[in-house]
Image (spheres, rainbow, N blue to C red):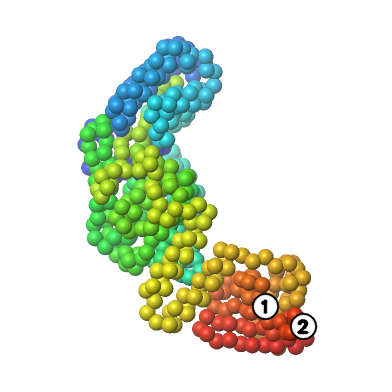
Amino acid sequence: MIRYFLKTIPVLSIFDKKLPVTLISIFIFINSSTFSQGESNVFPLSPLATKTLIDSLTNQIIKYYVIKDAAIKMNSYIKKRYKEGQYNNIKDPHALAGALTSDVLFINRDEHFHLEYNPQMANELLGNIDDVPKMVAEKLRQEKEKNFGFKKAEVLTGNIGYLEISAFSRLNKFSKATADAALKMLSNSRALIIDLRYGVGGSPDMVNHIISHFFRFPTHVSDIYIRSENTTLPYFTVPDSTYGALIDVPIYILTSYKTFSAAEGLCYELQSLKRATIVGETTRGGAHTVTYRPLSSGFVCDIPFGRAISPVTKRNWEKTGVIPDLKVPAERALEVAETKIFEEAFNKAKDSAEIKNLKWQLELVQSINHPVQLDTATFNSFTGLYGAYAISYSNGVLYYQKTGKAKFPLIPMTTSMMRVKGNDGFIVEFFKNYFGKVNRIATRYDDGRVEYADRTD
């Protein structure tokens, strides 16, 4: 899942599991003498520096790339291109990284794989850091600046929880507290929508922590197979009853063709366990785990070294993507999910009062999804005094005010009915007389009360 092993230094926190000693050494104890950054990074590289870069890249691919047969083919092709002199005269290091990446992907299109010229990261990976605590603190600050990937948590009209996640940060006490706070806020919702239309990679531990809120008992949700160690790491949910309602709340996940990696992992795991409905577009298809590894001359390579495997399907979503249960364009996914939530709510409604409330909420949701545009002349036709009510128009906004009460902006639902911005408890309807002049309003409340008032100005 799966862009976690990326760009992180305290890699041991990835799984919080006891890993084989040899695997730990892969992640952390890289011998800096093997990939010395002491060479001159003058471009184009010298023949020796170019050979050293190619050797370090192909050796890493052969040793770690998750699919052995593909690793052999990638290795052979890069060496062939090197012997042909394809990399000898590239003056821009970023262009060289791009050329090597393109050649690798020509053999095997793995969207997680790429090279980049990044001397600072190379030095960090090699342990060439003067102040490690400062570096760790800076990375934490950067994660906090992005709120650990949690972009938005709100309750939509109709008591629908909405959680937008852009990335899955490393799981630590800070990111865990942020995730828990977002889920706690949404725990009383009728249903939960998780928006991953722009979600990308990150920590499988964070994915697992989020998913754990949705299961009553420990549940086997995923495995990660690591080829170089011939090791499989299982993932089980760790149930948390703090927000018990989330165990039973219906879950809908929004996707797009941009949804990738760890975001896809969350989708695939919940879908395969029939715990969520996926709405939107087929995702990009990246199911490999990756980590940055230092090469030479300031280059680093993001090498996929493991793959996710579902204990349910025995497969993953690599190259195929996650197939939605409800296929719709990404821009319509939210509306479709909301409609589906109301359909299910109507089917489960126990009495007429609940049905009436659902209809009220659904009308509000539909008006939000399909806004009505009215011209200035129409708005002005509504203005005036209606007994204790005053309707005014200013700077393109229609206002409603009851004597002694606050002034509320009105938003058109139809050509004659308005919802109130910031208050779902009542709507305002305008009536016309035989001559087409607005002469009456009705204030309709969500509990069924209606207050009529005739124009008095």
Residue on which disc 1 sits: 400
Indicate left or right for 141 with 205 as reference. Answer: right
- Quarter of the image holding residue 348? bottom left
Amino acid type for the residue under numbered disc 2: Phe
> Total of numbered circles in the picture?
2
Q: Is residue 159 visible?
A: yes
Q: Nearer the viewer, residue 245 or 242?
A: 245
- For the C terminus, give its image quadrant: bottom right
Q: Residue at x 77, y 83 (%)?
A: 435
- For the N terminus, give its image quadrant: top left
Q: Nearer the viewer, residue 207 or 362?
A: 362
Amino acid type for the residue under numbered disc 1: Tyr
**Residue 180: where, in percent of width, then height?**
38, 59
Residue on which disc 2 sits: 435
Q: What is the distance, in whole Å, between disc 2 and disc 1 at their CAs?
A: 24 Å
Indicate left or right for 314 with 144 as reference. Answer: left
Looking at the rendered image, the disc whose residue lies closer to the viewer, 2 or 1, is 2
**Residue 71: where, in percent of width, then height?**
32, 26
**Residue 304: where, in percent of width, then height?**
35, 34
